[in-house]
Image (tube, helix red, strand yellow):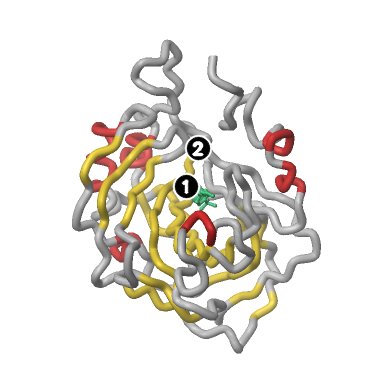
Amino acid sequence: MKGNHWGYGKENGPDVWHKNYPVALGSRQSPIDIPHQVSHDPSLGPIVLDYDHCTSINICNNGHSVVVNFDDTDDRSVIHGGPLENPYRLSQFHFHWGGKGCDGSEHTVAGNSYASELHLVHWNAVKYKLFDHAAAAPDGLAVVGIFLETGDDHRWLHTITDAMYMVKYKGSATDFKGFNPKCLLPSSLHYWTYLGSLTTPPLHESVTWILLKEPIAVSEKQLGKFRLLQFTGEEEDQRLRMENNFRPPQPLKGRRIRSSN
Ligand SMILES: CCCCCCc1ccc(S(N)(=O)=O)cc1
Ligand SMILES: [Zn+2]
């Protein structure tokens, strides 16, 4: 049996990650709860997502989530503005979700969870040569978080859920070209922002979080397709349904959360 790798089960879940990743008990961990009252910062400009020339490459199951990877060898898809001092390159996006009828977002808003949370992961290629370097630096990453709530079918999400049959097992991947994540954005780009961390090991405290206030609607049927995925590989005896792959909110430890208008 391979080492006790981290996961979301009883034996290897968020409550024990600190054993192998002591930063789990650090001072800028994510996710967090966004309280009712957040200071509005008029100096915070709008976030700009320049994804018109983005190039998606593939969709894969990494044993923790379903991930769509992008070509980030140049500045073809970047975000800038808002709290960011540089443009940050889009590297990948992925989701976190719950079980049947259970919520699965990572961040919560005034104690309320959403059904799921989409993370658009970007890195500071101005200051760092490689994603892995940026992922370990305090100003290395910028992740845009979008809440998913259950409602009508999402007109563009089906292109992702339809591909999930091809990546059911951990370690599987398939081509996924021509997808522009702009189609997953809500109508308003109003956001909350704070300094935090990766929400999975290695839990590096390297993320400027930008959480969009407005959720997008997806249907229960579409969410159900996420749960066809498995944490386990095709060759493993255990068949573990991929669900509840979220870390609960962590202590704020005095951090300021700012709100765009
Ligand atoms: C040195 C390699 C680090 C790989 C970090 C991969 C990763 C990216 C984003 C997130 S999340 N859920 O905070 O958006 C978690 C993990
Ligand atoms: Zn994530």
The location of residue 117, given as percent across then percent down, is 48, 51
**Is 201 located above or below residue 140 in the figure?**
above
Q: Which quadrant is the N terminus positioned in?
A: top right
Residue visible at 39% across and 63% down in the picture: 90
Q: Residues within 10 Å of mark 2 (few under 14, many from 20)?
A: many
Q: Earlier in the sequence, mark 1 or mark 2?
A: 2
Q: Amino acid under label 1?
A: Ser
* SS for callout 1: strand
Q: Is residue 217 left or right of residue 111?
A: left
The location of residue 38, given as percent across then percent down, is 68, 72
Q: Which mark is residue 116?
A: 1
Residue visible at 56% across and 78% down in the picture: 83
- The residue closer to the viewer here, 217 or 9, is 9
Q: Amino acid under label 2?
A: Gly
**Is 5 located above or below residue 34 in the figure?**
above
> Circle 2 is placed at which residue position?
98
Confirm if mark 2 falls within 8 A of ligand 2.
no
Q: Quadrant of residue 196?
A: bottom right
Q: Quadrant of residue 87?
A: bottom left
